[in-house]
Every structure is written in structure tokens, then in C-alpha cells.
Image (spheres, rainbow, N blue to C red):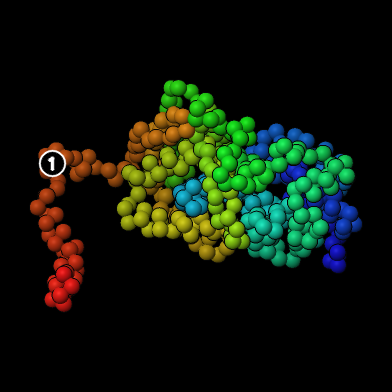
Amino acid sequence: MSEKVEKIVLAYSGGLDTSVILKWLIETYDCQVIAFAADIGQGEELDSVRGKALDTGAAKVVIEDLKEDFVRDYVFPAFRANAVYEGQYLLGTSLARPLIAKRQIEVARTEGADGVSHGATGKGNDQVRFELTYQALAPELKIIAPWRVWHLSSRQSLMNYAKEHGIRVAATQEKPYSMDRNILHVSYEGGILEDPWESPPEDMFTMSVSSLEAPDRPEVVEVSFERGDPVAVNGEMLSPAELLGRLNTLGGRNGIGRVDLVENRFVGIKSRGVYETPGGMILRVAHMAIESITMDREVMHLRDSLVPKYAELVYYGFWFSPEMKVLQAMIDETQETVSGTARLELYKGNCRVLGRKSDNSLYRRDFATFEADQVYRQQDAEGFIRLNALRLRIQAMTEKGRGIL
């Protein structure tokens, strides 16, 4: 490689791609490589990361627990916006990348590194998410994207490379799909999932049971919110990561949160992804239930019109863009009154609202009732309708005069 780099910080997971990349960077650039691993809820997957990275040649391994940061500063803001990409994807991977990249930059500065690297492929979204963050926060750092420059062209070639270099990896020919996990979700893509007609194997899932295997009795859960953020489950106050973990357990054992979709990647390719987001699904339903009684109609409709744009910015990697900052500020303003408790029923893959209450509720039974009331004059509706119909009447009269009607 023509570019000279003295020290590289690699976003390292210990999986197939980054394990191979770690060795490849050392051999290709003849420099120190620091492996940075962010604990954002992978669970047991990080247990062996340090030893594996050192065995593969890392000069240093930095592992940081960022679960609370992830949920508080990335997941909750997106859920305040009810962000969902293309109607189904709750952005579990998309939300994690800017946090990892941001902290990776901070490690690079602390360690005196002049380069950063990641394991994203040249076909995917993650390369954009990582590199937009790098360039937004540290444009002086050199960026190395191995998938765009090396000779390895497939997961099979990576497995062969790993075997030749004695690198321990979990991927096999029997289970070659790619898997990304954090406290919000698990995603699966590639390998046996590349045929969108084929059903995903049941033994692939890790966070949830099949709806067929879920309990035969429903489970009721209450989720409480303050200013748009969840703060308690069944009356127990919890930290952000603890709360999401609790809902993952509840949702997972009831088969909540599985999604199988073909999505449009930023680079223009359609990709089949399978996701598990049990706690996130519960949060979304509960949050919308509280909003339904606490948000003004026009404010809600304006915010809802911006959700596709918000989700696109997250999905495409523009978390640290000026437009995202402005949009988040507007979203957060809409959440000032969104406090209360939602009661939900979890049953065999379904999450259903049973009730909602709030001290800020705009719902007035004395106005909404079908029974006799003293606060609403039904005669007023006639003028309301006639004024709203005026332009329609004029249009009809004009068309009739022209012989169209």
C-alpha cells in the first residue's frame, strides 16, 4: 500500500471479518494495530475478544462498556422520534455505528494513532456510517477500508485466510450468515439468507422464541415514560440499559419483535435482513400509546411527516450532520408532554395496547362521549363542514359549467 500509516485503531468485534482484518492490517502496513471493542450489549461474545485480538497480533486491546451510552444517547432519541426505516426496521445496527466510530476516534487520539479502520464491506451501509462519522468528527485521520482494497472477495475466502493464519473464528460453511448483535437487536444477513424465498432457520434466533413456542397465557407489562423516554417497567425505575434489557427478556420469551424484510441499502442494493428487536418493539408500541393521549394533533402530524427523513438520516449514517441536530431538537420539543404509563399485553408474537394514562392527557371523556354532554354543540359541525367543503363545491360548480360533470 502506498499510504504510510504509523498506528491504526480498528473497530474490532472478534468476528470473522475483523479478525482477518486485524492480521491483514499488521502484515500490509507493518504498523501497530490497536483493537477497539465497544460493549453495547453483545453479551458473552466479548468474553474472548481480548485474548483473540492479542493472539492475532494486536499491540493493545481497548474494551469499553458503552451500553448505557448507547441506549441513553442513541436508542432513546430515535425512539422519541418513533424512527423506523421503510416501515419495519428499528435501526438497531444503524444506531450503534456512530457511537462506535465516535469512541474509536477518541481512542485514536488518546493513543496517538493516525489511522482508523473498520470491517464493513464495500457493498453495505456500515462503511458509510463509520466513515461519515470519522470525517465529521476527525477529518485528519486516515481511513482504511480493507474490503475495498484487498484481494479477498467473499466470506469463504476470509475463512480460508483465517485457517491459513491460525485465526480462531466462529463462522462455518454450515452457518455462514453474518450476525450483528447489541442490546437493541440482533441482525442476520448473507449466506443462507440471501434467497428471499427461503425461511430463516429457527435455530438461528438468539433473543426470542418462536411464537409457536411462546407461553399459552398472555403476559401484561406496564411501561412508564417521562418526556418521551421510558423510565420504569411495572413500576420499577431502571437505568436505560437495564430497562431495555428487561423488556428484551419479556418480549423475547413471548416471541415479540421478529422481522424479516428486504430493505433498500444506501448504496442502491436491495438486501434481505432478519432482525430480532423484542424490547424495542415493546417500547415503540408503548411510546405511541402515550403520545396518542398527550400530543397535540398538529404537532403529532408534523412530527410524523418527518419520521421517514429522520430514519433515513440514521440509516444512511448522518447522525452527526447539521440537519440531524436540528431535526432532533425539534423532535425533542414534541416530547415535553409525553409522560405517562402504557399497559400492554404480550402474547405469541403480538404486542397489544390494553390501556394508557397520563397526567398530561388531552383526552377528555366529556368531549368524546357518545352520551349526552354539555360541552359540545353538534349543530356547530354543519358550519364547519360547509366551510371545509366550499372549495369542493366551487370546483364542482365550475366543472358542471364546463360540461365535465
Say if 51 sits above or below 24 in the image: above
Residue occupying image coordinates x 46% and y 42% = 284
Q: Outermost residue toward the left? A: 379
271 or 231, which is in the foreground? 271
Which amino acid lies under the numbered mark 1 shown in the image of this protein? Asp
Q: Quadrant of the N terminus?
A: bottom right
Question: Dot 1 surroundings within 10 Å: few (below 14), some, or many (20 or more)?
Answer: few
Residue occupying image coordinates x 32% and y 56% = 298
- Residue hosting label 1: 373
Can you give x and y, in whole percent of width and height, for residue 365 in the image? 22, 40
Look at the numbered disc 1 and give the secondary structure of its residue.
Answer: loop
Can you give x and y, in whole percent of width and height, for residue 242 in the image? 57, 34
Can you give x and y, in whole percent of width and height, for residue 322 in the image? 55, 65
Residue occupying image coordinates x 88% and y 45% = 165
Q: Is there any visible trace of residue 221 in the rendered image?
A: no
Q: Outermost residue toward the bottom? A: 402
Can you give x and y, in whole percent of width and height, for residue 357 in the image? 34, 37
Say if 285 sits above or below 325 in the image: above
Q: Outermost residue toward the top? A: 216
Q: Quadrant of the C terminus?
A: bottom left
